[in-house]
Image: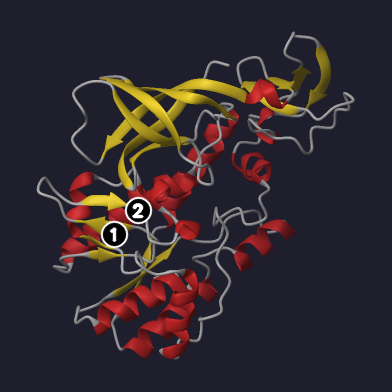
Amino acid sequence: MSGGVDSSVAAALLVEQGYDVVGLFMRVGAHGTADDDNAVESRRQGCCSAADSADARRVAGRLDVPFYALNFERDFDRLIDHFADEYTRGRTPNPCVVCNQDLKFGKVLRYADTVDAQYIATGHYARITAHDNGPRLMRPRDPRKDQSYVLFGVDRAVLRRTLFPLGDLTKDQVRDIARDRGLANCDKPDSAEICFVPDRDYARVVRERRPDAARPGTVRDRDGNVVGTHDGIANFTVGQRRGLGIAMGLPIYVTGLDAETATVTVGDKQDLLAGALRASNVNWLVDPPAGPFRALAQIRYHHQAAPADVHHDGDGIEVRFDEPQSAITPGQAVVLYDNETVLGGGWIESSPR
């Protein structure tokens, strides 16, 4: 229970369905420097704050269920370190996937075992359906709130013990349920996409965590000509257009990052297109096909999954799209779907343009 309306309604629905519910809150600590106004604002806006804990506790009290706050600060600190390290390597991480994999469906599950809980449940918008060879992770009914992408890293065995009570509901329906049940957070705004960077100043997190990693470098065009300089590649991500500080007479985008040489490559929109990618550390949620197969491949959270041929081997997967895709970004996840079923996914390593 994060203190938000989604997890609160998930708990309420489970109580009404007859489950013996125990509410858990992930206490992750306050991050950022004490004298940083942005960091103070982050602690006020992000999820898992003291105010969020109080909201969750109030909901648990109204539902008359036990409530515990678990100390995940050390684990969450490692997650933020990983986030910073990825940026220093010229990659763009997705910490929500890691949090789901290691904490919400990892450490929380181990806690569930200590209290003999059969299931873990969250307010994610996704569905689980039963099949002969095990449960399947599915997209939710409401495509606008689809969170199946950030759940691909959950261990397949964990799906048997997972409940997503909101999978068949829309956000409006969830808020209506909260109002009907008298939950005080029924109109609470959604939390930031990355809870510890609600101001979206990712470079600040890198500066705080890895102050020695930033080094200046050059900005080059696709032909290798120097067109500018920069203060560190952590300030950039593939596909970025704003904040480049370079005027070339036409819209330009970041098309590549080289951490070894501290080089940022820029180009026009066409230079962002790529027809294939390579991904590693693949997590399968179904039995992987014996040979090449067709799938819909989603390369970031708000990307429209695109048809592709997928080849897999012991080292990862290669995805070849029917049509070139824009801004395929190392460090992000590629998630494979069969219509609405999540097949699995991995972490993007490279994408030749």
Left or right: where does residue 5 sit relative to residue 19?
right
Residue at numbered disc 2:
103
At x 84%, y 32%, the residue is 245
At x 15%, y 66%, the residue is 118
In which image quadrant can residue 58 be found?
Answer: bottom left
Looking at the picture, how far across and down is residue 350, in whole percent?
Answer: 49, 21
The foreground one among 304 and 44 is 304
The amino acid at mark 1 is: Val
Q: For the residues labelled 2 and 1, say whether their Cβ atoms are less than 8 Å apart.
A: yes
The numbered mark, 2 or 1, whose residue comes first in the sequence reads 2
Residue 217 in sight here: yes
Q: Residues within 10 Å of mark 2 (few under 14, many from 20)?
A: some
Relative to 46, is 132 above or below? above
Which label belongs to residue 108? 1
Relative to 133, is 91 above or below? above
Q: Element under label 2?
A: helix
Looking at the picture, how far across and down is residue 206, in whole percent?
Answer: 62, 40
Total labels: the figure holds 2
Residue 67 in sight here: no
Q: Quadrant of the N terminus?
A: bottom left
Left or right: where does residue 308 sit relative to residue 34?
left
Q: Element under label 1?
A: helix
